[in-house]
Image (cartoon, grey):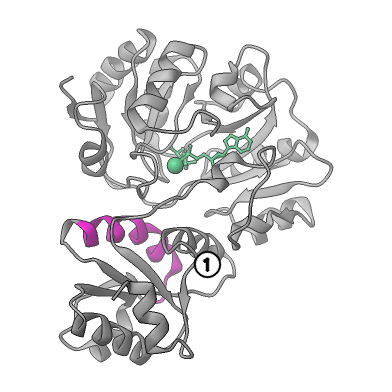
Amino acid sequence: MKTELLFLNEQTAQKGAELIKSGEIVAMPTETVYGLGANAFNEAAVKKIFEAKGRPSDNPLIVHVASKEQICTVASEIPPAAQLLIEKFMPGPITVVLPKHKEIPYSVTGGLETVGVRIPAHKQAQMFLEACGCPVCAPSANSSGKPSPTTAMHVFDDLNGKIPLILDGGSCQGGIESTVISLCGETPLLLRPGLITVEMLEAVLGKINVHPAILKDECVDKAASPGMKYKHYSPKARVLIVDASIDCACSFYDFAAKNGKKPIILWNDDQRAQVGSRNFEALIENGDMLSASKNLFALLRKADDQGFDTVFITAVNQKDTGLSIMNRMLRAAAFTVLTEKTQAEQLKSILGI
Ligand code: TXA
Ligand code: MG
């Protein structure tokens, strides 16, 4: 199949919408990451998403709608806590998990009685969703297991030849996927942290529960959030989080380089000078954690493209936005964190040298 890549405007939104209405799948931008969309009521189209991505079928998809009014076509009930979040944060980078509407097929929800719903804040995405006229279920538009795509070219790299159309809406400002919160239990439960932070959620809802798998490599029960049990966001390179000084990261780097690896350091831009001539990219610019979320997946993909096989990445404080960044980094690193106590022997075995 030939994959077209078109700038998203009124005309191409119509073209994409026609494909969606005819049961095809289309990649679209959002303010978080690119999604791979299908008409959420069309099971055959939904199946194409799982095939194109190589995604396990028990991992549910998020349903995207253009307006708050449309949420009741997707969910059977909107509890008061969900209503508060919808009023406060939608459109925006948040997904609420609600009891599903009977018309939403189980292929969308991975067999669950619940459904994740979100309204993207991306203007062109809204125009596309309006043109579609139906709820559009869309996971991130990457091959399953790879970092989520934050540009149309990332989508092309993963899905060229597998989908008919990629709508290009520029690079995603958020850079990491939406916050996912379930409102189906007694207390709201955070399933995936994102740019709508725990602090922001608690300011509206009071105390919420945070799923333990967010920062730990735990076996996850299927009912909570199937997505968490899969390996995520991993580039080909071995990613290692460094919870220590930049000097310490440089000595790990030198050890890897001496042993035949091709390493790179992803750190704060204000510590670039200490890195000298070693390979370096700025993860955090001007101390702004939002720059880290915007840059993270793009830098992991770039490291692969440039042939780096070992990525040393700075740990971040797990407050506010930092929680969601650490959550993505821990998965990319398969939960490996180096500290100043990490010995050469340990590093050797981690790097397989
Ligand atoms: O920002 C985003 O959310 C992007 C853009 C495209 O909207 N989408 C995205 O989708 O990240 P995906 O499929 O890569 O991640 C969806 C996550 C998964 O971890 C999944 O398990 C969880 O949301 N999820 C979806 N529906 C759920 C449900 N009914 N119950 C629990 N978790 C659910
Ligand atoms: Mg994904």
Q: Quadrant of residue 253?
A: bottom left
The magenta stretch spans which residues?
A: 287-304
Residue 257 location (% of width, % of height): 20, 81
Q: Is residue 200 visible?
A: yes
Beta carbon of the mark 1 residue lies under 8 A of ligand 1: no
Q: Considering depth in this image, is 274 or 85 the residue closer to the camera?
A: 274
| As drawn, 97 above or below 269 | above
Residue 11 location (% of width, % of height): 24, 19
Q: Considering depth in this image, is 194 or 191 the residue closer to the camera?
A: 191
Q: Quadrant of residue 276?
A: bottom left
Q: Residue at x 55, y 30 (%)?
A: 58
Q: Answer left or right for 75 relative to 138.
A: right
Quarter of the image where the C terminus is located: bottom left
Q: Residue at x 18, y 56 (%)?
A: 305
Residue 70 location (% of width, % of height): 59, 21
Quarter of the displayed picture in which ligand 2 can be seen: top left
| Mark 1 residue element | helix
Q: Residue at x 34, y 20 (%)?
A: 25
Q: Is residue 285 visible?
A: no
- The residue type indicated by label 1 comes to Gly
